[in-house]
Image (spheres, rainbow, N blue to C red):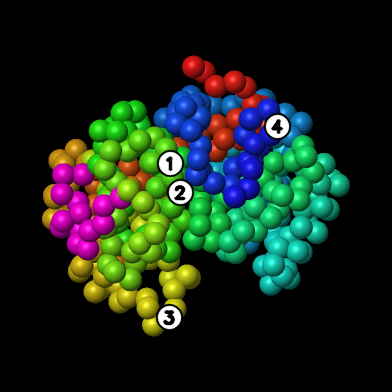
Amino acid sequence: MINQRRPDGSLRHLITLDGLPRAELEDLLARAQHFVCEPGEQPRANQSLAGITIGNLFTEPSTRTRVSFELAGRRLGAEVVNLEVQLSSRAKGETMLDTIYTLQALHFDMFIIRDPQAGVVAHVAENVAPHVSVLSAGEAHVSHPTQGLLDALTIRQRKGDRFERLTIAVVGDIRHSRVARSAYEVFRGLGVGDLRLVAPAAMMPDAGEFAGTHRFATPEEGLRDVDVVMMLRIQKERMEQAAIPDGDDYFARFGLTPARLAFAKPDAIVMHPQPMNRGVEIDSAVADGPQSVIRDQVRNGVAMRMAVLETIARPRPLRS
Ligand code: ASP
């Protein structure tokens, strides 16, 4: 696994949340909370990244992640450049590295990379100049660290920071989901009491993965008395055509309807990383209902990414 730290121990890259100590996760969440603003308020901003140039390199589609990383950088005073990277023109990360070396010569300091191939983000991180940082904006089915952090921030706002008291159910296509893997890493790091995986057999991860979680084959069993329901999109782009379930059939068995949500605690919150398939994994009555925090997740994305960028670019000792 790649070393994400500088020799002094501070965070230089963010490729995975695996192994981040609880104090560091809590510090990131607290910093992010400071950047959260209510709708209609003037967004928080400072100049802590003045003089820093950030390149956004996305070789997979993205709406929220790309826009929020861009806003996060700009609100901290950085220069942010969005680059069109043609996936077809590169083989095994080699052309990506050529692009990176060119941008390094143009004095870029940070690269934010989304890539459908596992290992490319770490490969870039291993080859950049010592002053340059690399952040994952989503890597294959493997990880999506800032999504995991913003999900934890959203839960903390509604449920407080005593994560050991919480029961969280992750529901749907866990097997192909980077969101679920990063959620698992951050929830484990924060000490979540009961983490449940709820999925049909074909969407359950292999037995060796997600150690310490409880697995359920139906939402009726898995959602019982949970505090948080985290729904996932079916990752069709990572499935064989024949394995993609029929939408109506899936909704009938796993879709989050008001009736199914009633198995959870009355004050349970509902999350979804988006894009959402209404009528497939979630009913609109739930997605737009009073228990949904899906829009909070989007809002928190900018704040969380500001906290991550600042932590990496301007390290400071953890508060004790
Ligand atoms: N937007 C999230 C991701 O990039 C979730 C999804 O696409 O289903 O992984």
Which residue lies at the image location 29% right of the left edge and 69% below the top edge?
A: 201
The amino acid type of the residue labelled 4 equals Pro
Residue 215 lies in magenta, yes or no?
A: yes
Q: Does residue 168 lie above or below 30 as drawn?
A: below
Asked whether residue 23 is in view, the answer is: yes
Residue 297, quarter of picture? top left
Question: Which sits in the foreground, 253 or 44?
Answer: 253
Image location of residue 266, percent across then percent down: 15, 40
Circle 4 is placed at which residue position?
7
Question: In the rendered structure, which disc, 1 or 4, sits on the residue that comes first in sequence?
Answer: 4
Query: Of the numbered discs in the image, which one, if any, rests on residue 241?
Result: 3
Q: Nearer the viewer, mark 3 or mark 1?
A: 1
Circle 2 is placed at which residue position?
182
Find numbered disc 4 in the image and state the secondary structure of the residue it sits on.
loop
Question: In the rendered structure, which disc, 3 or 2, sits on the residue that comes first in sequence?
Answer: 2
Q: Which residues are magenta?
A: 213-226
The amino acid type of the residue labelled 3 equals Gln
Q: Pointer 2 and pointer 1: residues touching (CB < 8 Å)?
A: yes
Question: In the rendered structure, which disc, 3 or 1, sits on the residue that comes first in sequence?
Answer: 1
